[in-house]
Image (cartoon, grey):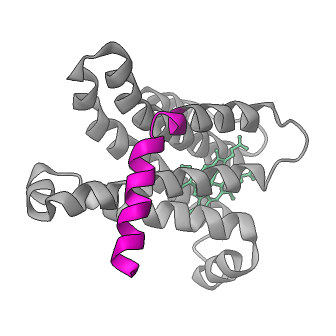
Amino acid sequence: MLPLIFLTSAAINNNLGPDPAVRLARETGEWSMRLLLLTLAMSPLKQLTRSSQWLQYRRILGLLTFFYACAHLAIYCLFILALEWNQLRVEILERPYITVGFFAWLILLPLALTSTRSWQRRLGRRWSRLHQWVYLSTFLSLMHLIWQIRSDISEALVYTFLFLLLMSFRREKLFSSFTYFRRRGD
Ligand code: HEM
């Protein structure tokens, strides 16, 4: 929660620079992206260190990702769009980087809601299938970021490299879900 504390204190002390709303939107967007990648890193870390202790952090990191993504969306709606809901609809429909960001957020919503043990028990094997949508959400978040690059691409390159690296650990699992969906379709 440290980024939130720093941002709140900077806002209270009027220390957010010339455009506080954009600065808040950028910082919360950055933190959702970082936390999303950190959440995805827990399984590979388990594999690499042969210790399952990493998995105990996965849920809280996932929930923090969702928390920052909601803060990001709330700041955008409140301070940039001034709660003009019609404008939000137009932005989602007409600006591709907002469209993909919105879908990335929308996918995170059911994942956060079903993150509890009771939902895990209730959904059984379907729970893992559902939670694999996190990869699509990360991919869309990266597109959201790349689509708005103005000059410096270094940050987007680092996030993309980390995402591809984390995906390489997941090749088999993703392939098995692909064949699962194909079999269901046959
Ligand atoms: C409905 C959902 C979303 C909306 C409306 C939205 C909106 C925005 C806007 C307007 C900006 C540009 C701020 C500016 O530079 O003027 C931005 C930047 C960003 N957003 Fe989102 N976003 C959404 C979802 C997400 C999600 C789910 C993530 C990641 C998990 C994310 C990560 C980022 C990042 C990393 C940036 C770039 C920050 C920078 O310039 O350094 N956004 N978003």
Image quadrant occupied by the C terminus: bottom left
State yes or no: residue 176 in magenta. Answer: yes
Q: Position of residue 121 (x, y in %)?
A: 8, 56
**Residue at position x 53%, y 35% in the image:** 168
Q: Indicate whether residue 30 is drawn in magenta.
A: no
- Residue that appears at 40% across and 36% down: 39
Quarter placement of the N terminus: top left
Residue 26 position within the rendered picture, expressed as x and y whole percent measured from the top left = 66, 44
Depth check: give the residue in front, 27 or 113. 113
Q: Position of residue 185 (x, y in %)?
A: 39, 80
Q: In this rendered view, identify the residue nearer to me: 143 or 77.
A: 143
> Do we see residue 67 in this rendering?
no
What's the residue at 68%, 56% (across, down)? 144
Specify the segment rendered in magenta. Answer: 166-186
Say how many tags the image has. 0
Q: Between 164 and 9, which is closer to the camera in this rendering?
A: 164
As rendered, which of 167 and 8 lies closer to the eye? Answer: 167
Residue 154 position, x and y percent, is: 80, 31
- Asked if residue 37 is positioned above or below residue 185 in the image, the reply reads above
Q: Main secondary structure of the magenta part?
A: helix
